[in-house]
Amino acid sequence: MDKGLSLRDVSISKGGTPLLSVTHDIGPGEVLTVMGPSGVGKSTLLAFITGTLAPDFRATGEVWLDGHNITRAVPHQRRVGILFQDDLLFPHLSVGANLAFGLQPGGSATERKAKIDEALNEVGLSGFADRDPATLSGGQKARVALMRMLLSEPCGLLLDEPFSRLDAALRAQVRDMVFDRAKARALPVLMVTHDADDAQAADGVIITLGQPA
Amino acid sequence: MKHLAVLAALLAPVPVLADIDPANWDAVTAEAEGQTVFWNAWGGSTTTNDFIAWVGDRVMEDYGVTLEHVKLTDTADAVTRVLSEKQAGEDDDGAIDMIWINGANFAAMKEADLLFGPYAEQLPNWAIVDSEGKSVQTDFTVPTEGFESPWAMAQVVFVHDTADMPDRLGSMQALLEWSAANPGRFSYPQPPDFLGTTFLKQVLVDILPDASVLAAPATDETYDEVTAPLWAYLDELTPNLWREGKAYPATGTAMFPLIADGELDLSISFSPGAASTAIANNELPPTVRTFVLDKGTIGNASFVAIPYNSGSKAGAMVVANFLMSAEAQARAQDPAILGYGTVLNMDALSEDDRALFDALDLGVATLSPAELGTVQAEPHPSWMVRIADDWMTRYGVAQ
Amino acid sequence: MNRRRFLPILPALTLLAMLGPVIAGLWGTVMPAFGHLPAAGLTGPSLDPFRDLFDWAGLPRAMLLSISTGLLATSISLAIVMLVTAGWSGTRPFRALERLLSPLLSVPHAAAAFGLAFLIAPSGWLSRLMSPGVTGWDRPPDLLIVQDTWGLTMTAGLIVKEVPFLLLITLAALGQADAQRSVTISQALGYGRLTGWLKTVFPRVYAQIRPPIYVVLAYSMSVVDVAVILGPNTPPSLSVQIVKWMSDPDLAMRLEGAAGALLQLALVIGALVFWRIGEYVIGRLGQRWIASGARGRLDPVVAQLALFAGAASALAVLLGMVVLAIWSFAGFWGFPDAFPDTFTLRNWMRFGPGTLEALGETALIAITVALAALILTIGCLEAEYRFGLSFSQRAVWLLYLPLLIPQTAFLPGLQTLMLNLGADVGRLPVMAAHLVFVLPYVFLSLADPFRAWDTRMGTIAAALRASPNGVLWRVRLPMLLRPILTALAVGLAVSVGQYLATLLIGGGRVATLTTEAVALASGGDRRAIAVYGLMQTGAALVPFALALLLPALVWRNRKGLQHG
C-alpha cells in the first residue's frame, strides 16, 4: 500500500522490558485509536514515529509514510503532524506568527498573510492574527494549534490525548473539527487516548494495549 | 664598589645595556616617540595618581610618549614581576617599563641584574640635580650608580592635630611618654610598609647614642645588640598605640582620615608638604601642623628605575628626564598638588625656572627647609630587612 | 553544516575551559611547594618550603582565621536563611526580604565590604548617627572593630553577602520540594510553622543546596579581597599571606607561598570533610528530634530572631551603599557629624575619569567572558538535548570544582606556568581565568530553566518542519530570553567582582574597577573608595536591572512569558 501510515513490526522496550508491539496500516482518512491506561507506553509510540524517542528506550521495526521509510529520517523531515493535549502555541509569537511558523516557506508576504487569514477564517477566528495566544480561550487555542499543524502540510497526523483538557461541550466540537479536517485532507490519523468517547468518535480501528509489565 | 659593579655587569648573563645609548639624547627622544611606558607606581594616594596622570599628559604633548600608570599596592609586586619574567625568559618586552622604587627593592633588583643602566647621570636634566647637597647618588647607603634617577626628596615629619595635641615633641623618648599619657592616639603604618619601617628606623636612629653603626651592613654580631633598645621601646609603646597595636593603618595616607576623624592625634609622614596638601583637599582639619625631632629626622630620595627587559626604555628615560625638569619638580613641590621636596639645585636653575619655585606657597603645615633641620641618613638596607622581619614576628603575628 | 560536528565536542571544550586552568594552576603550585623552580635555579624535591612555612610564627593564627571565618560565615548565613525560610516563606515579610535581598546578590564583595567598614567602624556612620547624643562620644572610641584580631568583622562581611546567595539558591530548591503542602500537613498535625518546615522540608531542600553551600565554605575560607578590606593583619588570614608571599621580591618566599597554597587547599578539603561529618551528625540528631514529636514551642521567638538577622544583614549592605554614596559626594566630614558639612561633585569629577577608564576595561572583559560562557553553556545544554550528551550526576560536581578549589591554591601557579609558556600577560589570559569562575555560575543559572523548557514545543516545531537549529533559534532561545539574560547578568557580575584572577593573571596591567578599588583600600581615601565602590556596584547591578527590564519590554504583549 502506497498512501497512508504503516507501522511494521514496531516494538518498543525499556531496559530490556518490552512495552508494546504494533503492526498496523492506517489508510488515508482512516483513524487508528490506541487505548490503554497511562504508563503503558502509548506516547512512546508517538515519540518513535516523530523521531523524538528518548535515548533510554529501544525500538525496532519500521514506520512508512506515503511509501517512504521514515524510520531513520530526522524529525523535521518526516512530515508527521502532531497535536498534544496542551495547545503548545509558541508564547513569544502572535497567533498569526504561530500560523506562519507552520506555513511552508514560499510565496510573497501578501500571499502568506492571505493564507493565514484564510486559515483563521476557516475556524471562525477572523481578525485574531495579531492577538497574544495567551489571551485566547481554550477552544480558540486548540483551533489555532490545529490550523498551525495543517498549514505545515503533513502527510500524517498524530493525536496525543488531544481533547482531554477541554470541557465536555467544547470537546465534541473540537474533536469533530479535527477529524473532519483530517478526513478532508485524506490524512492517516493515529490517536492515543484513554477516553472511550474519543475512541468511539474516531470511528476506526481500536487497539488496546495491555497492562504495563 | 664601582669595580664590583663593572665586574657584575661583565658577568651578567644578559646584556644590561642593550641597543639604546642614554648619552645620545636625540636618538632617545626619536625612539621614544610612539612608545607606551607602563609605570608601576604605588597607587594608594590619589594626589600622586593625579600627578602621574599630569606627567602622562605632558610627555605625550612634548615627546609623543604614552604613559600608563600601573597602580601597585606594594612595589615588591613589580619586583616579583620582573623576576618571574626573567625566569620565563621574557627578556625583550616585559610588562614593566619603569618602577617607582627605592631602598631594599632597588638593592634587590640591582643585585639581581634586573635593571637597565647606567642611564640616570646621562640624562640632560641631571645637570640641574643637586647631586652634592642631596642624597641622590646613594639609596639607603647603596650607590645608585646611574641605575635609578631621583625625582622627589622625602623627609620624616610628624603630623599632629594642634586642636588635640598643641605641642611638638622633641624626641622619641618624649613620644613614648606622651603616648603613655594619651593612649590610643598614635599609630604608624604596619611594617613592611615603607613608612612603617621608616618609623622603626627613626626610633632606632633617635634613641641610639651613636647611630653611625647603622651605616654598615647589619651582621649577626651587631644586630641583636644594636636593636635591643628598639624592641624595649616598642614593647613599652605598643600597648598605648591605637587599637593597642592589634591593628595598624595599612599606609601613611590611611592615617590622614584617622586624624580627620579624631581617632589619632599624631602620625608620621614621609612628605613634609603632604599635610598642607591634605588640608587643601578637605582630608585634614586646618588645625594640623608638622614637626621634626630635635636631632632631626631621616630623609631620602624617591627614584625611578627601568627594568632590564623593558621594551620602551627610550620612552621611560624621557619620562625619567621629564620628572627631573623644573616644571615637574615645581609642580610636585606645590602643596596643592603633591608637596614633595625637590631634588634640584636652585643655584643651577635659570631665573625663570627658579621663579617657579619662589612663587610656591608651601602651605600652613609645611616646615621651611631651615625648620626641617638636619637630615639623618638612612641605615643600610640590611637593617631594615631584618628589623621588618623581626617586627613581624614580634608584633605582626602574635597579638 | 559544521555545527553538527562542532556541537558534540562543546561539552568537552567547556570542561577544558573550566578545569584546564585549575589543573594547570595546581601543577604550577605543587612544583615550587616542593622546592622545584628550575627557572630560578632551584631544583627539588625538597621539604624546605614546608619547613619555612611551619616556622612562620603567624601560621597557627592564620590557619585558625581561615577555618573560623569559613565555618562561621557558612553556618551562620545558612542558619539565617534556613530559619527565615522556615518561619516566613510564603508570608509578606518574606517576600519583602526576598525583594530586598535579590539585588544585593550582585553587589560585589569588595564594595559590600567597604560599605560595611564605613558603617560599623568606630568613626563609621552608625557611630556618627548616635554620637554624641546616644553614646556621648565626641571622638571615635578606640575600639578594634574593623580588622579585629578574630576576623569577626570579616566574617560579618562574608555573611551579609552569602545570605542573599543562599536565599536565592534555597528559593530555587523550594520550587521542587513541594514545601507548602508539607508545611500545611505538619501544621495540621499541630507543629509550629518553623518546626514543621525544618522537620519535613529542610532535609529535601538541604540535599539540593548542598553543593552551593560547599562553595560558600571554600570561598569564605580563602577569600582575599574581603579579607584585605575587613580582615586582621596581625597576622592576616592564610590566603592573604599567600598572596603576600607570592609577591615578595625574595624568591624563597614564593616557595613558601606555594607551600602555603597547598596547605590552604588541605584546609579547605579538611573543612569540607568536617562539614560532611557535621551533616551526618546533625542528620542523626535531627532524626531523633523528629522522632521526639516536639511541636516547636519556641517557634515564634526563633522566627522573629531569624527575621531580624536576615533584615539586619540586608540592611547592612543597603546602608553600606548609602554611606558610600554620601562619602562620594562629601566635602569635609568631621566626627561626630551625621552628615558632611558640604556636598560636592568634586570627588566624582576627580575620580570619575579614572573610573570610566577602569569601567571600560571591566566591561570589555566581563562582556566577552560572559558571552563566551553563555555560548558554551547553551552549546552544552543543546548538545545534551539533541544527543543526550548530559553530565552524569557525578560529573555535575565537576561544575563546582573550580569554585571549591581555593583561588589562592591555583591562580599563583597558573601565573608562573603562563610565564613559563611565554604567554603574555594581559587581557586575554585574564579573560580565560575569569571564564573559570564565570562558566559554572552561568551554567548553573541557565541549566534548570533550559532543561525545564517543555520539549514538546520542540517536537511540535519539528513536526512543523523546523530544523534543530530553527527550533533553537526561533523557539527555544526566544522563549528563554529572560533566563538567558539573567544568566548573562550573573556572568557579568561574577566577572566584575573578580579580584585575584585579575590581579595575578593580569600582571598589574589590567586595571578593572575591582582591582582599582581594592588597591585604594590601603590608601584609606574614603572619597575615592566610595566612587570606585559605587561604580563597581553599578557595573554589576545594571545588567541585572536590564535582565529584568528587557524581557518585560520585548514581551510586554506576551502574557505567556511574563512570569517565566
Image (spheres, helix red, strand yellow):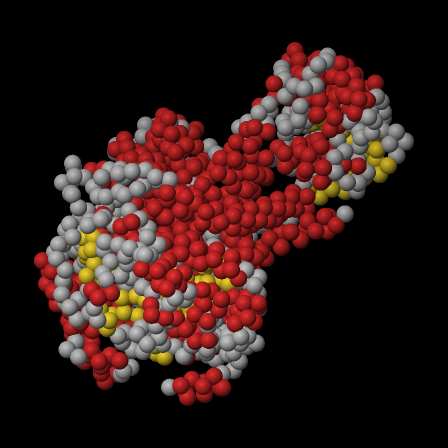
Q: Position of residue B321 (x, y in %)?
A: 45, 67
Question: Residue at position x 78%, y 16% from top?
Answer: A118
Q: Which residue lies at the image location 65% right of the left edge and 19% below the top edge?
A: A131
Q: Position of residue C429 (x, y in %)?
A: 55, 59
Q: How many marks?
A: 0
Instruction: Report if residue A199 is visible in the image.
Output: yes
* Quadrant of the rendered image containing residue C193: top left
Residue farthest toward the right in the current orientation of the protein: A1
Task: Estimate the x, y position of residue C460 in percent, counting from the top left.
Answer: 70, 31
Q: Residue furthest front?
A: B351
Quadrant (top left/top right/bottom left/bottom right) for the C terminus of chain B: bottom left
- From this viewpoint, is residue A44 visible? no
Please tell me which residue is depicted at 85% across the width and 29% down the height of the picture: A4
Residue closer to the observer: B39 or B392: B39
Q: Which of C417 and C343 is in front in this view?
A: C343
The residue nearer to you, when weighing B353 against C272, is: B353
For the N terminus of chain B, the image quarter is bottom left
In the image, residue B324 sits, relative to residue A63, either above or below, namely below
Q: Is residue A62 left or right of residue C382?
A: right
Q: Is residue C386 left or right of residue C261?
A: right
> Does C168 sit above or below residue A146?
below
Residue shown at the point (51%, 57%) measured from the top left: B61
Residue C356 image offset from top left, x and y in percent: 48, 46
